Each structure stands twice: as C-alpha cells, then as structure tokens.
Amino acid sequence: MQTLVGIYFLGESVGLDCGTEMGDNGGMSLVTDVFACPVCQHDAQACCTHPEGVLMRCPSCTHCFTDPRTVAAESYSKEYFRETHKNWFANPNLELFGEIAKIAVSKGGGLKVLDVGCGMGDFLLYLRGKEPTFVLTGIDLAAPPSVDGIRFITGDFYKTDLGSGFDFVVSLAVIEHVGDIRSFVSRIKALAKPGATVVLMTLNEGGLIYSVSKWMNVVGFDSVLNRLYSKHHLHHFTTASLRCLVESAGMEVLSQGTHNFPLAAVDFAECGFVADRLKSVGVALLFALGRIWKGAFLQTVVCKV
C-alpha cells in the first residue's frame, strides 16, 4: 500500500509517494503525530519517515524539521572537519565572506565580532585580513586552531561565558544543526548590544535542488532527497520560516537573499569517476538555474538587534 503525502514547497503542495514502512526500499513512510513547531510553536504534522528519523512540517510558517525524539545528537570531532565534510571546509565560501565583510567594515573599525560555530575559524581569519582592528571571538564545540589576534573558544555556546556587547554576530551553516533554535537565536540576541548586526546563513528548503529532489523521489530516485533530509541537518528553513524565527526573537530583518556555495565544496559520496563527474555537472546546472530563479541552495539573513 502506498500513501500520498503533501509536502509544501513555495506555498504549494507537492505529492510525495512514500513507502509505508521505515526503510522500505530506502523510501519514507507516513507517520501520524503532532509536535510543536520550533519556529512558531504551532502544531506541526509528521509528514513522513526518513530512513534516519521522522520529518515534521508546520503548515503555519512552512518550516520542516526532524522530530528530535527520533534522532540522537550528532558529535563534532576533528574528523567531522577533516574527513566527513573535508570538501566543505577545504573550500570556504569566499564570495559570501566578502559580502559579510563589506557590511562589517562599513560600520567602522574596532568592532567586537562573534562567530558562533566558527569551525576552523575560516571566516574570522578572512575578516582579520580585511580589518585588523576588529576584536574577534569564535566559539565551537570542536577545538578551533590557535591563532594570534583571534580568541577561539572550545565550549558549549549556551553555557560558556563569552561576555556581551558584541557589535556584529555571525553564524554560518550552524542553526540547521541546532536542536532548540529559539533558544539559540535568543542567546545570540542577548550577547549582542542594541543596534548590533546579526548574520545567519543556512539551507534554503525553497530552493531548486530541494524541489528537484522531491520530484525525483516521486519517480523512484530517493537518494538525493534522503541525503538532503539526513539527520545531519535537523532543520530545513524556507525563507519564510527563517524570517519568522528572527522576527519572533525581536530582531529586524534588514535583508535576506539566496545563494550557493563553491561547487568544489560539495561532499559527494564517491561512486566512480564517471558517476562523480555526472553528479558534479548536475549540481552545477541546478546551482546556476537556482541562482537565476532566486531559488539557490543556501540563504542568508541580515538582522538588526
């Protein structure tokens, strides 16, 4: 027996053909359950079961997330950066770094800058090269490198004493991994001084790649969709749900846009030379089309506290 489940995309409902048992031919199955949306607190419905957990959809703010009761917390050791996502960290998004740096530099010298989930410190290293007078702090669960002129902290973002009064707070490709996103955004706001700038970058579930993956799943090719909705990413923000989250925290959205990341940063599962080249060409095409149609894979929002 097959069940047709509606998944919302850009305000419309798209049919997703799902198996009835978890892991049925690698597919996904319907689960009936309700859970409070972590963005707007409205009732979110279980839309289907991914091989790694239950996916929920909020009909109010459009947010999609993995039911936290169905997955275990992910660990972030040095292997996460060196092996699991080696291409991502070996090819930082310098175009995005440049756009964010322009905003920071325009505010003058001496800014107190905080990078939440700084990883190996790539953005702060880039920013130091653009404006050496900035006071730079980065925090991550994994141990960042030791670099002169940058205060790197290994610790829990919620519990570590970072001080306060930051002029500029950045968090890039982090919030999709966080369980309690409302507390995460509230903590960022508390660390920033009034009038400060906050920049958040995350996935864009309204993007073309997500849309194509859903249609591929309908015709029996579920590998792309299963990878996109892996438990590695607990949250899949639309532009509407990300805006809803930051505004509910009392921040003003100054700008919001979609964009991609370097093709070299994609971490493909290796399938052989020919298959890997075909995947690269396919992703490059979707990146290009998504950018033209303003449905790129990532999104960044710039806010004022």
Image: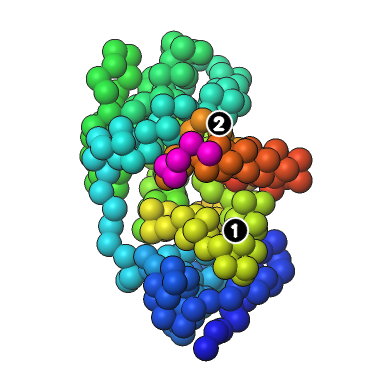
Which amino acid is tagged 2? Pro
Residue visible at 36% across and 26% down in the picture: 121
Residue visible at 52% across and 63% down in the picture: 222
**Rendered location of residue 211, percent (x, y):** 65, 58
**Rendered location of residue 147, percent (x, y):** 29, 16
What secondary structure characterizes most of the magenta part?
loop
* Element under disc 1: helix
Q: Is residue 230 magenta?
A: no
Q: Specify the quadrant of the image occupied by residue 72.
A: bottom left
**Residue 191 in sight:** yes
Which amino acid is tagged 1? Ser
The residue singled out by tag 1 in the image is: 213
Between residues 50 and 9, which one lies in front from this camera angle?
A: 50
The residue singled out by tag 2 in the image is: 262
Relative vertical location of residue 230 with respect to residue 113 in this rendering, above or below: below
Residue visible at 59% across and 58% down in the picture: 213
Q: In the image, which residues are magenta?
A: 270-274
Relative vertical location of residue 112 with respect to residue 302 in this rendering, above or below: above
